[in-house]
Image (cartoon, rainbow, N blue to C red):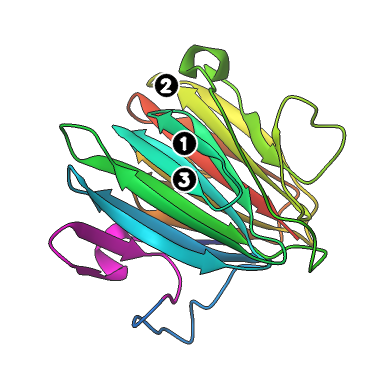
Amino acid sequence: MIELRPFSSLGGANHGWLDAKHHFSFGSHYDPKRMSWGSLRVWNDDTIEPDTGFPPHPHSDMEIITYVRKGAITHKDNLGNQGRTEAGDVQVMSAGNGIVHSEYNREAEATQIFQIWILPTSRGKAPSWGAKPFPKDDRSGRFVTLASGFEADTDALPIRSDARVLGATLKAGETVEYEIDARRHAYLVPATGAVEVDGVRVNARDGAAIKDLKRFSVKALEDSEVVLVDAA
């Protein structure tokens, strides 16, 4: 099954400094049909204006992955971690038993991110944060694991979840296949471009909710940058 969720159908709000679209129920946006997808709980499409951002606020027991699409995001938390993550790169925060953090756009242009929340498999652990560059050329024509709860994915940022976050950059006409246990849940969003997932067209920032499949193909209709979550 592949359920298309067009960008135009997403809930959200424009706060001036933040234009947020929500693939799932989040904050004041509630849609009982889009509460989660397996252990994937949140996929927010955020545009943050220059010199603005999220002031310090707390989280606990959630794996929070930030994929930067444009610009850069600057992180600071009460553990002493600080870092700037730029377009194409990824940061991961395991909120564990509690963390307070801020995320600001210190750039001269608007920053665009996907913020992805995945439920952890264990609760009450020590919080942590990390970031890593993932050059787009290294993902050309294939999926690369960006964040993972599996020890075998040694090059990925670690998360405490039965899930993977993957990225691929595809030139127009290229096709990549992905194998998945039919009991798991996949959610795919093109950051840019347009693709066909087993013949279903998915435009930039649309979502494709996928389940009950053992394999699916992703064909680029245009040069495309794709993000995929494979979750229990």
Q: Magenta residues? A: 4-26
Q: Residue 7's quadrant in the figure?
A: bottom left
In the rendered image, residue 23 lying in the magenta stretch gets the answer yes
For residue 226, the mark is 1
Could you tell whether 144 is left or right of 24 in the image? Answer: right
Residue farthest to the right?
A: 151
Please name the residue shown 41% across and 60% down the image. Answer: 56
**Residue nearest the observer in this picture, 69 or 190:** 69
Q: Are marks 3 and 2 in contact (CB under 8 Å)?
A: no
Residue farthest to the left?
A: 16
Q: Which structural element holds mark 3? A: strand
Labels 1 and 3: the sequence-earlier one:
3
Q: Which structural element holds mark 2? A: loop
The residue under label 3 is: 76
Q: Residue 28's quadrant in the figure?
A: bottom left
Q: Give the residue type that dot 1 points to.
A: Val
**Residue nearest the observer in this picture, 194 or 18:** 18
Tag 1: Cα neighbours inside 10 Å, few (<14), some, or many (≥20)?
Answer: many
Could you tell whether 56 is left or right of 152 in the image? Answer: left
Asked if residue 104 is positioned above or below residue 24 in the image, the reply reads above
Q: Give the residue type that dot 2 points to.
A: Gly
Q: Gap between marks 2 and 1, in whole Å?
A: 14 Å
